[in-house]
Amino acid sequence: MSFIQDLADQLAKDVIAAQDELQDDRFYEQVGRVLLAASPTLNEAFMTSIRIRLAEKRGRDFLARVLKAKREGAKAPEAPKDLSAQ
């Protein structure tokens, strides 16, 4: 990773942790606006890291719910519909 990507990714990790504490799942948008005013390049790298990390978090949550349902004999949650196939 480049220096900018490293900075952006560390900030993304910190912001996601802060969102949990702040109970504000859109706090990253505020941080993004601050970055955009100061450095569009850092903002772009930050937003990419945020999207990737949030997607990974959602994927892990889905995996955990499916496994829990399987272990408890319950119906597994369904994945979102593939909207690109329309």
Image (cartoon, rainbow, N blue to C red):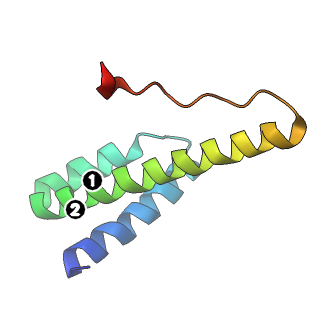
Q: CA distance from mark 2 to mark 1?
A: 6 Å
Identity, as a three-letter code, of the amino acid under mark 1: Met
Q: 11 or 30, which is in the foreground? A: 11
Between 46 and 56, which is closer to the camera in this rendering?
56
Q: Residue at x 26, y 79 (%)?
A: 1
Amino acid marked by disc 2: Ala
Residue 10 relative to residue 5: left or right: right
Q: Nearer the viewer, residue 76 or 36?
A: 76
Helix, strand or loop for disc 1: helix
Snapshot quadrant of residue 77: top right
Q: Position of residue 12 (x, y in %)?
A: 38, 61
Mark 2 and mark 1 residues within 8 Å of each other at the beta carbon: yes
Give the vertical position of 34 relative to 70 (above or below): below
> Residue 44's x, y, as percent?
18, 56
Residue that carries the numbered disc 2 in the rendered image? 45
The residue that appears at 61% across and 28% down in the rendered structure is 78
Q: Residue lying farthest right?
A: 72
> Which residue occupies 70% across, 47% down?
64
Compared with residue 7, is residue 72 higher up or lower down, i.e. above or below? above
Q: Secondary structure at mark 2?
A: helix
- Left or right, 59 with respect to 76, comes to left
Quadrant including the C terminus? top left
Near mark 1 (Cα within 10 A), the count class, few <14, some 14-19 or many ≥20, is some
Relative to residue 34, is residue 71 depicted above or below? above
Is 39 positioned to the left or the right of 59 in the image? left
Q: Which mark is residue 47?
A: 1
